[in-house]
Amino acid sequence: MPVQLLITIGVIIVGLWLLLYIFPISLWITAQFSGVRVNLMTLVFMRFRKVPPGLIVKSMILAAKAGIPDISVEMLETHYLAKGNLVAVIKALIMADKANLKLDFKQATAIDLAGRDVLDAVKVSVTPYMVLVPAITAVSMDGIQLIAVARVTVRSNLQQLVGGAGEETIKARVAQGIISRIGMATSYKFILENPESISRQVLENGLDAGTAFQILSIDIADIDIGQNIGSMLQIDQASADLSIAKAKAEERRAMAVANEQEMIARIQEARAKVILAEAQIPAALSGAFRTGNLVAGIDFKKDQPAKKSTTAKK
C-alpha cells in the first residue's frame, strides 16, 4: 500500500508539472498584472512551436513599461523564429525612445537580422566615438611630402545601418580627401599654417554618403614633414637624362669607330687593287713584246743618226 501511494503521489506531481509546463498559468498571471494582454492558449501553442513563452512575455512587459507602441506577440514570436535577439531589440528600442531617436520595431529587427549589433548601434548613435585613421602620406605641389594623422568622430546613422558601408569605407574616403587637399596646396607651408583647411574641405565633400555612419568632425591631430619628393624626382630625372646622353654619346662613338674601321678596310682594299694592277703590268709588257705591239709603236729612225752621203765626198 505505501508503494502504491508513493506511485500515485509521483504521478500526480508529474501530471501537475506537465500541466503547469503546458499551461504557464503563473506566466499568464504575471503578464496580466503587468498590463500585457496575452491569451493563455497562445502561450500554450508557443510550447508546440518551440518558442519560450517566458522570453516573449518578458519582452512584452519591457516594451509596455517603456511605452513602446505597436508591438504584438506575433511580431516578437516571428523575430525569435527568425533567429533574432529579442532582448537586444527591445533594449535598443527603449534606448532610442529615451534619446529621441527615430527607430521602430521593423528597423530594429532588420538591423538585428542583418548581423549587426542593434544595441551597440544605438549606443554609438547616442554616444559618438572616434575612428583612428592611419597615417596619411601626401605630396604638395612644391614636392614636399607631408604625413598627416587624422581623427574622425562619427555616430551611427540608424536609417542607413542596413546596407550602408562600414568603418573602413570612412577611413578610405577621409584618407582620399586629405591626399587630394594636400596635393592641391601650392606650398607645404600653407598646410602647416592652416591644418583646419583640410578638415573643412573634406567635410564639405560628404564622405559619409551611403555609409552607416554620420561624420561629425575630422580633426588633424598631427602633420609631419617627410622627404623632398620633388628634388628626388628631379635628381632621378637628371640621372636618367645623363644616362640617356651617355648612351647616345657611346652610340655616336661606336658609329665613328665603325666608320673608321670601314674607311681603313676600304684603303686596304684600294691598296690591294693597286698592287693587283701593278702585278699585271709585267705580264702586259711581255705580251706586247711578243705580239710586236710595243716595237711597232716606236719610230727608230728618229732616234738613229743620219748617214753621211758618200757621193758628196767623192
Image (spheres, rainbow, N blue to C red):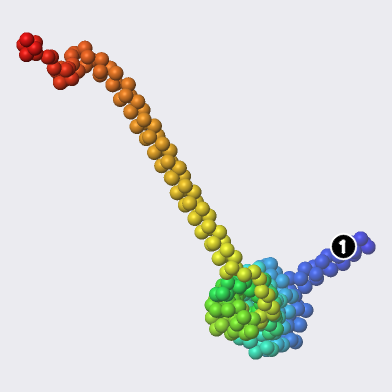
Judged from this view, the residue extending furthest toward the front is: 314
Residue at image location 68% in from the left, 82% down from the top: 128
* Residue 286 left/right relative to 175: left
Rendered view: 257 above or below 242: above
Check disc 1 and give the amino acid type.
Ile
| Quarter location, residue 163 | bottom right
Q: Local crowd at mark 1 within 10 Å, few (<14), some, or many (≥20)?
A: few
Q: Is residue 119 visible?
A: no
Residue at image location 58% in from the left, 72% down from the top: 143
Count numbered badges in the picture: 1
| Quarter location, residue 186 | bottom right
Residue at image location 29% in from the left, 21% down from the top: 280
Q: Nearer the viewer, residue 156 or 107?
A: 156
Q: What residue did someone put label 1 on?
A: 7
The quadrant of the rendering that contains the C terminus is top left
Q: Secondary structure at mark 1?
A: helix
Residue at image location 18% in from the left, 20% down from the top: 303
* Residue 290 left/right relative to 224: left
Rendered view: 78 above or below 94: above
* Residue 228 left/right relative to 306: right
The quadrant of the rendering that contains the N terminus is bottom right
What is the x, y in percent for residue 56? Answer: 70, 76
Rendered view: 192 above or below 283: below
What is the x, y in percent for residue 274? Answer: 33, 28
